Amino acid sequence: MTAVAGAAAALSPAAPAGARPSDPEAAGDRAVGSRIDKLYEQAEAATERYNAASERARELQRQVEYAQESAARKQERVNRLRSALASFAGAQYRSGGIDPSIALMLTEDPDGYLDKAATLDRIGSRQHDKLLRFKSAHRSLKQQRSEAGAKLGLLEQERAERKRHKQAVLKKLGEARKLMRELSAAGRAERERASRAGERGGPALPDGGKASSQRAQAALAAARSAVGRPYVWGAAGPASFDCSGLTQWAYGRAGVSLPRTSQAQRSAGRQVPLSRARPGDLVVYRDDASHVGMYAGNGQVVHAPHPGAPVRYDPVDMMPVSSVTRP
């Protein structure tokens, strides 16, 4: 589930092939194309926020499940201790009545009852120890239930946040699809041609353009193997990808675990200047780090650009570079 937007307006040709610069139709296509690219950029930023919310929700889900399992185990212990106290209470009753202290097991507030020290001197040390263990287990159970409830609340918030970001993505993409219908036939054909141009072949590594490590080389090989597969927002392979989904999947194939979002991937290694980029490095774009690709050498990146444009090669300077990270 990564970035939706991708190639910036600079990737789109200024006018359809054969069109005169002053051609009103070509000028209209340029204006509409610029609006489409902006919508893709906004959708990509919303996609990364969606991916981040999804990651937080998954982690909270794991925490909730652990807290609930822990609470269940503690409830079993409380039940066992309560049962032991019940046996003791039964013996007390048969021998002449229940000592007031044993009423502890019948109350939902053992702390308050047990804190009355006067009750403790009426029972033996063995029963005293049982009551103390019951008190501790009951207190721990309440705390665990409280923690589980708090995490459930946070999980619901993250799910609502994810839903809002999803709606934002779908809205931007819907607007982009409508604008596509405003393009002339020549304009649509040119955008389609441009979106497929980077699928052919791919740059060979230039002299001295070796990857920084065997893992980086393996990750680049995986990314190259994905060229031509479709862009799907929120997808992380292997059949389809968004931008950070592609880089996460590629490095995963090389045995390296990357975070899910382009913003987090920016910090997933050592940053180097663009002039020192080596094949396999992550190239992060825009000030908000809403797009990421993988440097392929020879001034090219391989990336998942945006809906309708499959994984492909593009110039590394296709849009403003925010940083270069070497995992």
Image (cartoon, rainbow, N blue to C red):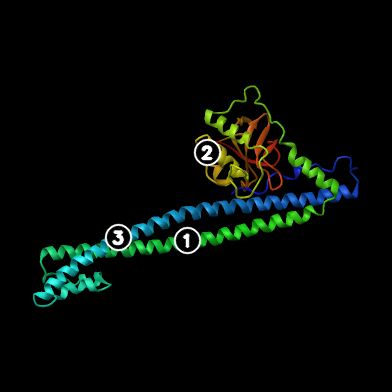
Label 2, label 3: how far apart the Cα atoms are: 38 Å
* Residue 33 in view in this figure: yes
Mark 1 and mark 2 in contact? Answer it, CB < 8 Å.
no
Q: Amino acid at mark 2?
A: Gly
Classed neighbour count for the residue bearing mark 2: other residues with Cα under 10 Å, few (<14), some (14–19), many (≥20) = some
Residue receiving disc 3? 74
Question: In percent of the image, x 60 and y 41: which residue is there?
Answer: 246
The numbered mark at residue 154 is 1
Q: Return the residue found at the far left.
A: 95
* Residue 274 in view in this figure: no
Q: Earlier in the sequence, mark 1 or mark 2?
A: 1
Q: Return the residue found at the far top.
A: 207
Label 1, label 2: how far apart the Cα atoms are: 29 Å
Question: In percent of the image, x 65 and y 55: which residue is there?
Answer: 169
Question: In percent of the image, x 61 and y 43: which residue is there?
Answer: 239
Where's residue 102, x and y in %? Answer: 17, 72
Q: Earlier in the sequence, mark 2 or mark 3?
A: 3
Mark 3 and mark 1 in contact? Answer it, CB < 8 Å.
no
Where's residue 224, x and y in %? Answer: 63, 34
Where's residue 115, x and y in %? Answer: 21, 70
Q: Secondary structure at mark 2?
A: helix
Q: Secondary structure at mark 3?
A: helix
Q: Secondary structure at mark 1?
A: helix
Residue receiving disc 2? 252
Q: Amino acid at mark 3?
A: Lys
